[in-house]
Amino acid sequence: MHAPLRYGILGGTFDPPHIGHLALAQEAYARLGLDRVWFIPTGTPPHKAGRPISSGADRRAMVELAIAGDERFALSTIELKRPGPSYTVETLHTLRAQWCGADNAGGNNDGEVWIGFLVGWDMLASLPEWHDPSGVLAALDGLIAAHRPGFTADDAELDRLEAQLPGLRKRLTLLPAPQLDLAATSLRERVAAGLPIRYLAPDAVCAYIEEHRLYRGEG
């Protein structure tokens, strides 16, 4: 009987992926003893309706470039391939079926996978507003919340979340992570303003943005 594989999931639009994403994935991998962190670009993010985002093909290519050569990380295109809004609860059910189902027969983990979902503290605070948040919790083995600049994980806030979503605390792990106050929005704004983003995103991602002239029309 082998121990279950331990997978972390990091979702987002990744428009573009940057060093904050990579640092968070690395920290979770190291501190939680994960076997792999899966980057999952969102297809159609319901919480960003009306905001233009780069094509799924561009965002997939940038994630591939960002994690290339790092065996700790992998890409899943499950949400890019699914039509309609990208709901986390649906993604989790599909991934668990894939990772724990017949496809894993004869593997080294007896068809068992521990699944942890990575979020920033700001996203954790909004969890009750997600589509079927109780279903999200039920589909997870661990909810991993990373500290973010400007957001504090205090007991009062955790009590509020537990009251709205019973069982949250027993699945929750607060992850101390490098405090990089960096957002994809700021990178897009810098590109639009003609400012460099080298050292804020992997060189290969910067080169892709330049080659494909992404974000040039944003103010």
Image: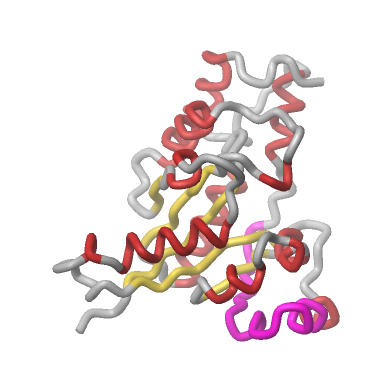
Q: Is residue 86 left or right of residue 93?
A: right
Could you tell whether 103 is left or right of 37 in the image? Answer: left
Quadrant of the drawing holding the C terminus:
top right
Residue 135 x, y percent position in the rendering: 59, 71
Q: How many marks?
A: 0
Decide which of 35, 117 is in the foreground and name it: 117
Task: Please check the rendered image and state whether residue 169 is part of the magenta-colored stretch, yes or no.
Answer: yes
Residue at screen point 64% across, 84% down: 167
Residue 118 seen by the camera: yes
Looking at the rendering, the stretch of residues picked out in magenta corresponds to 159-178
Q: How is the image coloured?
A: secondary structure
Furthest residue in direction left, as rendered: 106
* Residue farthest front in this picture: 84
Does residue 203 appear in the picture of this structure? no
Up-down relation of residue 15 to residue 181 (above or below): above
In the rendered image, the vertical position of residue 193 relative to residue 167, given as above or below: above
User: Where is 212 relative to 63, above or below?
Assistant: above
Report x, y in % for residue 10. 53, 54
* Magenta segment includes 172: yes
Instruction: Out of 12 and 89, give the one closest to the viewer.
Output: 89
How far across and how far down the image is residue 205, in percent? 52, 29
